[in-house]
Image (cartoon, rainbow, N blue to C red):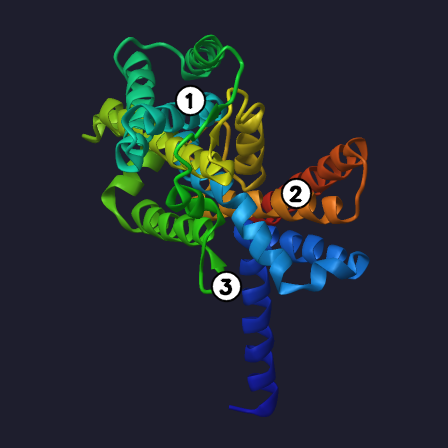
């Protein structure tokens, strides 16, 4: 083979790799995350410390955990708007059980059980009673918020026993790495494998893409969706424990607007609102992009109004990149 032929083959391979990269949703999101990170490293000298990134990983850990359940549920074609209220319910139940039983273990178990119970109820309403998940979860969200307000009389529930091991669940480190970040990474890896490498993962995409076709092919659509609702509730409960462990307090107003942030990050990460499209890794990148944007602006001491504008611009840039990728894919086809 001549030198000219070798050069042509190399150029073709490079072009093919570039095209594949541009067609990848995750690649475009990684580029956006790198751009956002680089911008704040340049503009904010304080952001150049390693500690800042460890602090960021601690702060976004609850979001990363909740986005697991929300992303998979949305890929499966359903919604769950209760995750913000779940943070409040889980925290209040956990701390109240601490005080009632004087047992950290029983309190944490009680708080964690809230997740699958609420998720199971929501899944039952949607899969058995055929109620729409958007409005049903919205109603459940209001019901949970109201119940917490009534029970606490809008007063924070404080851990009177001062369980330091519980606080360490959020504040602690293993080496330099925060415990919440490690927990989030482990859960993300587990569910990335499940969603990408298992039959159940393929069922999620089939159910979200075309429920009728999935049912005809033998997939148990209702059972798959029910499991996803339980998973979403469980992930929210785990995040609720972390939020409560931050100060050892169950706040009645914890998670206000949290569900919108998670859904925004999920859609930003390429998960379709109509189901059957996107991936968990993209949703994780969406959380990191929003988290890095918020962290950088807080370090710059920007007003909240300015933060909203910048966040909106970042989201619009992500939408543009998503559209660019779609155009490249369609032209190739």
- Observer-nearest of 17 and 231: 231
Query: Dividing the picture into quarters, in which one does residue 214 lie?
Result: top left
Label 3 Cα neighbours within 10 Å, binned few <14 / some 14-19 / many ≥20: few
Location of mark 3 (residue): 176
The mark nearer the N terminus, 2 or 1, is 1
Label 2, residues with CA under 10 Å away: few <14, some 14-19, many ≥20 = many
| Closer-to-camera residue (55/318) | 55
x, y (%) of residue 216? Answer: 22, 26
Label 2: which secondary element = helix
Residue 122 spot, x, y in % from top left: 34, 17
Residue 30 in view, yes or no: yes
In the image, taking residue 110 as reference, residue 180 lies left or right, namely right
* Location of mark 2 (residue): 318
Report the Cα–Cα distance between label 3 and label 2: 32 Å
Could you tell me if the residues under marks 3 and 2 are in contact, i.e. CB atoms within 8 Å? no
Q: Earlier in the sequence, mark 3 or mark 1?
A: 1
Between tags 3 and 2, which lies in front? 3
* Number of marks in the rendered image: 3
* Residue at the limit of the structure toward the front, as seen here: 161
What percent of the width, then of the height, locates residue 333?
53, 48
Picture residue at 37% right of the left edge, 23% below the top: 96
Residue at which label 1 appears: 89
């Amino acid at each position: 083979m001549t030198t000219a032929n070798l050069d042509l083959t190399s150029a073709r391979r490079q072009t093919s790799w570039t095209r594949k990269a541009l067609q990848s949703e995750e690649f475009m999101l990684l580029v956006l995350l790198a751009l956002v990170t680089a911008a704040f490293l340049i503009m904010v000298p304080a952001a150049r410390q390693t500690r800042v990134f460890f602090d960021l990983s601690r702060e976004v850990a609850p979001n990363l955990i909740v986005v697991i359940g929300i992303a998979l549920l949305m890929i499966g074609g359903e919604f769950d708007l209760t995750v913000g209220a779940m943070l409040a319910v889980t925290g209040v139940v956990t701390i109240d059980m601490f005080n009632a039983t004087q047992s950290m273990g029983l309190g944490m178990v009680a708080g964690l059980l809230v997740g699958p119970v609420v998720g199971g109820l929501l899944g039952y309403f949607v899969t058995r009673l055929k109620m729409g998940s958007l409005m049903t979860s919205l109603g459940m969200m209001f019901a949970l918020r109201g119940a917490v307000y009534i029970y606490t009389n809008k007063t924070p529930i404080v851990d009177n026993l001062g369980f330091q091991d519980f606080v360490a669940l959020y504040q602690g480190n293993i080496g330099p790495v925060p415990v919440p970040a490690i927990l989030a990474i482990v859960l993300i890896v587990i569910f990335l494998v499940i969603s990408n490498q298992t039959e159940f993962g393929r069922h999620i995409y089939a159910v979200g893409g075309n429920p009728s076709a999935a049912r005809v092919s033998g997939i148990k659509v209702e059972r798959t969706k029910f499991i996803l609702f339980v998973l979403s509730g469980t992930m929210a409960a785990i995040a609720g424990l972390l939020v409560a462990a931050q100060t050892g307090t169950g706040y009645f107003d914890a998670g206000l607007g949290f569900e919108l942030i998670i859904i925004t990050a999920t859609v930003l990460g390429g998960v379709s609102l109509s189901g059957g499209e996107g991936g968990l890794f993209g949703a994780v990148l969406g959380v990191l992009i929003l988290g890095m944007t918020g962290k950088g602006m807080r370090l710059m001491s920007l007003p909240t109004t300015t933060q909203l504008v910048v966040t909106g611009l970042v989201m619009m840039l992500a939408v543009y990149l998503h559209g660019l990728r779609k155009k490249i894919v369609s032209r190739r086809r």
